[in-house]
Image (cartoon, rainbow, N blue to C red):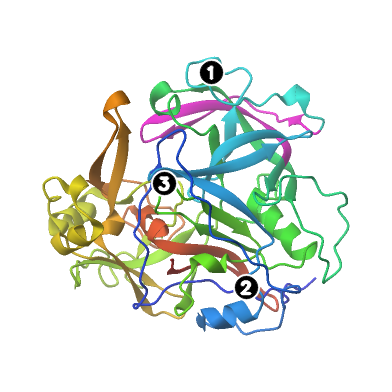
Amino acid sequence: MAEHQDACTHLTAGPQAQPAPATALATTLNPIEKPPPPLKTLAGPPKHVHQKLYSEESVASLMSRGLGNPLMRTHLVNNNNLQYYGEVHIGDPPQKFLAIYDTGSEQLWVPGERCHGEACVHHHKFHPLQSQTFKQSIGGERRMTYGTGEVRFREGKDTVRLCDSTRGCFDELTKAPRPPGSTKPVTALSADRQPVGMTSYQSPDPFKKLPFDGILGLPPSGNFGDGHHQSLLGEWLRVARFRHHHPRLISFYLSPDTSVKGSVAIGGIDRHHIDQSDKLRWHNIHPPTDAWRVQLVDIAVDGKPLHLCGSGVDGPEGTCEAMVDTGSSLITGPQGDASKVLERIGPLPHACDRLSSEELNRRLPQLDIILRDSSGKDVWYPLKPSDYVIRFEHHHGHTGPSQTCELGVGKLDLPFNRDSHHHGRGVWVLDTMTQAYFQVGARRCYYSSCQWCIEYIGSI
């Protein structure tokens, strides 16, 4: 079947966007939560029309096509402005876990029943024998390393469910297509036979003290491994499109406030968190589509470009490779280039943890991330100092909480992808940007031509 019925649009903010103050997620195990603003639902199903894939569209136009009514939303908790995590359910009957929703990795893993170390003791463990749909995969133990730790796991396959936080989590009664205009609420999206890593070891640092159980990787690629089954995100979006008549679209709101929940939405955009006066631009995800990679043109400090990617030096278009990552805490880049950014920003002001956002914005320069959109235009995304300075909250027993702050920009040498055109340069990771802007990823189709894209827009 031709895929021309998908009329998704990727969101990006233009130069006038006013981003919300960026922070990372909250580290506190029990954050004080204020209720999110009430969610309203548009009447009727989304309108799917044949539409040319424009590189720019107003938010009002997007909303008029019914995309402001997501199929479902899952709350994301801000862990001390470092990570965002939410619920995921594995197996049948489902076993509940808390996981980082991570667009920067591919693997879903949770603690396994054979993990007896101190990092697993106080976390939920997956018990495969309690699931009627679990299948053990062939292969040995695998290892994944992170900046401050590692995990080892074996892999199986099982059903993975995403549940709506506002409606509870009840499995769907039928897998038959829903008729257009159906008003019955959807409470769960299921993806069968998905790879699930069950850890046998997790390093105590950092996993022992983290409030979530595992990591839920969400790459944009369509298939995994055997080439016959959709990836987890691909399957969720397929179900949203063909069974529930919603666009193949995932959107993130990463709350800058540790006491307010963020959200991940499938099949639409939470219009309460976006600047509706803004314009949207979208950026193509370049193959291979195993990561959300966009074209970084440059970074400017105080309005002055640093010429980090050159002109025709690193690739035919003079751009660097950047990953859009909801699972990391910083904007990171190759040692040499990141050092130039840090030198231009300068040191943090004395006692910055006591400064208001307004005072911080007066003392430090603005940072601009310059990305190339799908039409070849360069779009500037401003980050105020209050966006790229991360504030951490610490608890000291009877003395009460205190704050420290650090720059949300760091040096990290990641290898460039051998299949990309950006030879000779490392990869940038744009985490702090995803916290300052509402982020949307979608499978965008026009007749037989489809393209994975990423969009940004100012959040409120």
What distance separates the C-alpha of mark 1 from that of mark 2? 43 Å
Magenta region includes residue 372: no
56 with respect to 26 (left or right): right
Residue that mark 2 sits on: 8
Q: Amino acid at mark 2?
A: Cys
Q: In this view of the protein, which residue sits in the foreground, 195 or 73?
A: 73
Q: Judge whether 152 appears above or below 34 on screen.
A: above
Label 2, residues with CA under 10 Å away: few <14, some 14-19, many ≥20: many
Q: In this view of the protein, which residue sits in the foreground, 51 or 121?
A: 121
Residue that mark 1 sits on: 121
Q: Earlier in the sequence, mark 2 or mark 3?
A: 2
Q: Residue at x 65, y 64 (%)?
A: 70
What distance separates the C-alpha of mark 1 from that of mark 3? 26 Å
Please name which of the two marks, 1 or 2, marks the residue nearer to the observer.
Answer: 1
Label 1, residues with CA under 10 Å away: few <14, some 14-19, many ≥20: few
Q: Which mark is residue 258?
A: 3
241 with respect to 369 (left or right): right
Q: Residue at x 34, y 78 (%)?
A: 16
Q: Residue at x 78, y 45 (%)?
A: 170
On the image, which quarter does residue 14 sit in? bottom left
86 with respect to 399 (left or right): right
Q: In this view of the protein, which residue sits in the foreground, 205 or 291?
A: 205
Magenta part of the chain = 133-159
Q: Judge whether 101 appears above or below 365 on screen.
A: above
Q: Is residue 282 visible?
A: yes
Label 3, residues with CA under 10 Å away: few <14, some 14-19, many ≥20: many
Q: In the image, residue 159 lies at what x, y percent?
A: 74, 40
Q: Amino acid at mark 1?
A: Val
Q: Secondary structure at mark 2?
A: loop
Q: In this view of the protein, which residue sits in the foreground, 299 or 120?
A: 120
What distance separates the C-alpha of mark 2 from that of mark 3? 31 Å
